Image (spheres, rainbow, N blue to C red):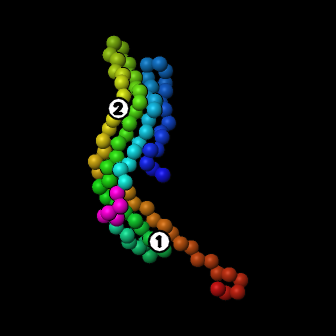
Amino acid sequence: MVNNLELPDFYQDKNHYMTGNHFYLDERTDDVIISTDTKNNAMVLRCEKLSGKFVNDAFRYRKDLITADGHLEVDINTINIQFGVSFDQKVLIDGR
């Protein structure tokens, strides 16, 4: 779901824009920590030290006489992701 996430373009005018924005998360299946959150009746999964990359196909920024344009590639070395799955209980009419 996160991998190859397309981000919206930022366009102000012909001198200020960032288009073709994407984020890639390097998948990792080891070192996933599974724990419980009894207060919320949830199972929690946490993965540390993921890496990712932000890629921009075209950008331009102009301020007075200085103009910067090109594309961006940003490497991110440490990303921590944690999420939980919570369970609810429902009592049926027959008491189950």
For badge 1, the amino acid type reads Ala
Residue 59 lies in quadrant: top left
Q: Nearer the viewer, residue 65 or 52?
A: 52
Q: Which residue is mark 2?
A: 72
Q: Secondary structure at mark 2?
A: strand
Q: Residue at x 49, y 27 (%)?
A: 11
Q: Position of residue 76 (x, y in %)?
A: 31, 45
Q: Position of residue 64 (x, y in %)?
A: 36, 14
Q: For the magenta stretch, what is the residue range?
A: 28-32
Image height of 13 relative to 48, above or below: above
Q: Position of residue 30 (x, y in %)?
A: 32, 63
Cα gap from disc 2 to disc 1, whole angstroms: 39 Å
What secondary structure predominates along the stretch shown in magenta?
A: loop
Q: Secondary structure at mark 1?
A: strand
Residue 21 lies in quadrant: top left
Q: Which residue is mark 1?
A: 42
Q: Residue at x 41, y 30 (%)?
A: 57
Q: Position of residue 79 (x, y in %)?
A: 33, 52
Q: Residues within 10 Å of mark 1 (few under 14, many from 20)?
A: some
Q: Residue at x 30, y 41 (%)?
A: 75
Q: Is residue 89 left or right of residue 63?
A: right
Image height of 35 relative to 68, above or below: below
For badge 2, the amino acid type reads Leu
Q: Which mark is residue 81?
A: none
Looking at the rendered image, the disc whose residue lies closer to the viewer, 2 or 1, is 2
Question: Which of disc 1 and disc 2 is earlier in sequence?
Answer: 1
For the C terminus, the quadrant is: bottom right
Q: Residue furthest bottom?
A: 95
Image height of 80 relative to 18, above or below: below
Q: Residue at x 38, y 71 (%)?
A: 35
